[in-house]
Image (cartoon, rainbow, N blue to C red):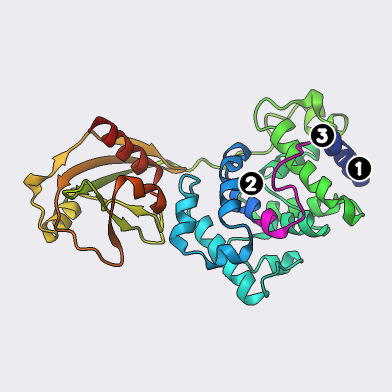
């Protein structure tokens, strides 16, 4: 194994010269760092750059976020996906206010107590905001370590995961002040140079000490996870409009697809939709079947068939509201529904 101090020094020097700088969350404010780390989970930097400033403008500090209604948080999150992140973000903000006096804890162990914050995310916050000697281990870092130090194992094996954690911990620089540049360097090297496909080995500061390069195993490491089979899921939407053109929306359950968002009544079978419509005084012959379309989630392919109808019979309640076109954005509709309704309005 190469000298770990050489790795850390090279990475820090490379990051300061060639890494990503000027990102809006590259600050010492733990709230801003935490917010970015949650948004960046399974989401590309380019996408987060669009959402992050709007979120920070509306919720400039942790108390503002904690005090906001969950619906408003979800509405601003709409389109980012993985909506449990938004719900956990809101809960964690309330934890910081209620359990930590409005100040973010500074250690990884304490940060891990926050909803939605795992070990690697907690380490990133601790390193960036508080210069703590804590290592991250996200997908990009795993790829760098597996190639550089020829770590060959099943990525879904917990023992192999622990082996990578131990290696990552052994590589950290000794000076706390180097941790932000080092941590950013790990992220940057994996994201921009040691990429999954077409890695830029000619620009890598570790090329001469890369075991996978020497053994011609770059395309082999790290081992790929077993592919998750994509599930085909039929959905039926009941798109109800009243005499004013407002659309009937209902709050989705917290768990499941589009958890916590407002959506038109959504069903897994035609019979469920017909039963619901009947209870609302809508006959099956009053519904017009529209052209079906697909929408891809990470491991699901949704086959959506909308049925449109006109009715004023829906009774507003805790989970149901009439929303006019100008109000849709405030409720944070699922991306495919927002797109569908916009298309319907244009053709109307």
Q: Is residue 280 magenta?
A: no
Depth check, mark 1 against mark 2: the one in front is 1
Closer to the camera in the image, 255 or 227: 255
Q: Residue at x 30, y 67 (%)?
A: 318
Q: What residue does disc 3 label? A: 211
Say above or below: 243 vs 317: above
The CA span between labels 1 and 2 is: 28 Å
- Residue 308: x %, y % from top left: 18, 43
Q: Is residue 121 above or below residue 48?
A: below
Whole-angstrom CA distance, mark 3 to mark 1, is: 18 Å
Tell me the magenta residue range: 18-34
The residue to which callout 2 is attached is 155
Q: Residue at x 65, y 28 (%)?
A: 197
Q: Are marks 3 and 2 in contact (CB under 8 Å)?
A: no
Q: How many marks?
A: 3
- Per the image, label 3 sits on a secondary structure element best described as helix
Q: Nearer the viewer, residue 98 or 163?
A: 98
Of callouts 3 and 1, the N-terminal one: 1
Element assignment for label 1: helix
Q: In the shown orientation, is residue 259 left or right of residue 236?
A: right
Using a 10 Å C-alpha cutoff, classify the residue at mark 2 as few (fewer than 14 neighbours), some (14 to 19) or many (20 or more): some
- For the residue pair 327 and 3, the one nearer the viewer reads as 327
Q: Main secondary structure of the magenta part?
A: loop
Quadrant of the image for the C terminus? top left
Disc 3 or 2, which lies upstream in sequence?
2
Q: Which mark is residue 9?
A: 1
Disc 3 vs disc 1: which is toward the camera?
1
Tell me where residue 217 sits by quadrant. top right
């Amino acid at each position: 194994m190469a000298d770990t101090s050489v790795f850390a020094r090279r990475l820090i020097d490379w990051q300061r010269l060639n890494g990503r700088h000027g990102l809006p969350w590259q600050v010492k404010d733990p709230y801003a760092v935490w917010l970015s780390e949650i948004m960046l989970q399974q989401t590309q930097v380019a996408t987060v750059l669009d959402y992050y400033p709007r979120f920070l403008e509306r919720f400039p500090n942790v108390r503002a976020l904690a005090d906001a209604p969950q619906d408003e948080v979800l509405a601003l999150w709409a389109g980012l996906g993985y909506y449990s992140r938004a719900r956990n973000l809101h809960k964690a903000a309330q934890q910081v206010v209620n359990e930590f006096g409005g100040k973010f804890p500074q250690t990884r162990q304490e940060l891990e107590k926050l909803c939605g914050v795992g070990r690697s995310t907690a380490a990133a916050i601790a390193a960036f905001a508080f210069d703590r000697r804590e290592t991250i281990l996200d997908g990009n870092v795993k790829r760098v370590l597996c190639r550089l130090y020829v770590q060959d194992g099943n990525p879904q094996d917990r023992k192999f995961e622990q082996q990578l954690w131990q290696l990552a911990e052994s590589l950290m620089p000794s000076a706390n002040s180097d941790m932000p540049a080092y941590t950013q360097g790990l992220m940057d090297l994996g994201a921009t140079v040691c990429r999954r496909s077409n890695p830029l080995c000619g620009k890598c500061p570790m090329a001469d000490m890369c075991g996978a390069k020497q053994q011609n195993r770059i395309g082999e490491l790290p081992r790929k996870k077993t592919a998750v089979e994509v599930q085909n899921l039929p959905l039926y939407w009941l798109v109800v409009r009243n005499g004013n053109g407002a659309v009937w929306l209902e709050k989705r359950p917290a768990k499941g697809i589009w958890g916590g968002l407002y959506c038109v009544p959504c069903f897994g079978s035609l019979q469920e939709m017909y039963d619901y419509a009947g209870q609302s005084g809508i006959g099956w012959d009053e519904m017009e079947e529209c052209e079906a379309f697909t929408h891809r989630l990470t491991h699901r392919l949704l086959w959506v068939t909308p049925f449109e109808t006109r009715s004023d019979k829906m009774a507003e309640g805790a989970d149901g509201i009439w929303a006019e076109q100008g109000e849709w954005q405030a409720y944070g509709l699922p991306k495919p529904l927002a797109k569908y309704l916009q298309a319907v309005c244009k053709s109307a």
